Amino acid sequence: MKASDLRAYSLHELHQLLHQKRKELQELQYKNAQSPLSNAASVIPAVRKDIARILTIINEKRHERAQS
């Protein structure tokens, strides 16, 4: 996901997406611990980066709301 796409979402939608991505990451880590996934080296870091992007946009929106 691109940050520009995420900026179009509302705070509520971003929190829901964050919850989904964290759940996805947890499931991937669990599956990888049970039996190593062939694509874990690329999928897990990508989900982590998505989570970081979402958190960044949430913080930007909160900061904008506090300024106004």
Image: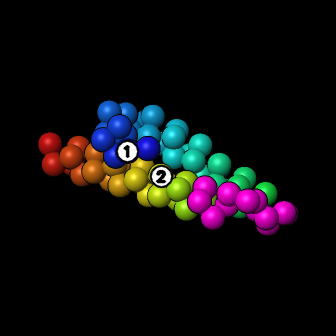
Mark 1 burial class by Cα count in 10 Å: few <14, some 14-19, many 20+ = few
Residue 50 numbered tag: 2
Residue at horizontal 21 percent and vertical 46 percent from the top: 64
* CA–CA distance in space, label 2 to label 1: 8 Å
Numbered marks: total: 2
What is the x, y in percent for residue 22? Answer: 59, 52
What is the x, y in percent for residue 58? Answer: 36, 48
What is the span of residues highlighted in magenta in the rendered image?
32-43
Whether residue 40 is visible, yes or no, is yes
Residue at horizontal 28 percent and vertical 45 percent from the top: 61
Q: Name the residue under label 1.
A: 2
Query: Which image quadrant for residue 33?
Result: bottom right
Judge left or right: residue 54 versus residue 62.
right
Whether residue 62 is visible, yes or no, is no
17 is higher (above) or lower (below) than 40: above
4 is higher (above) or lower (below) than 37: above
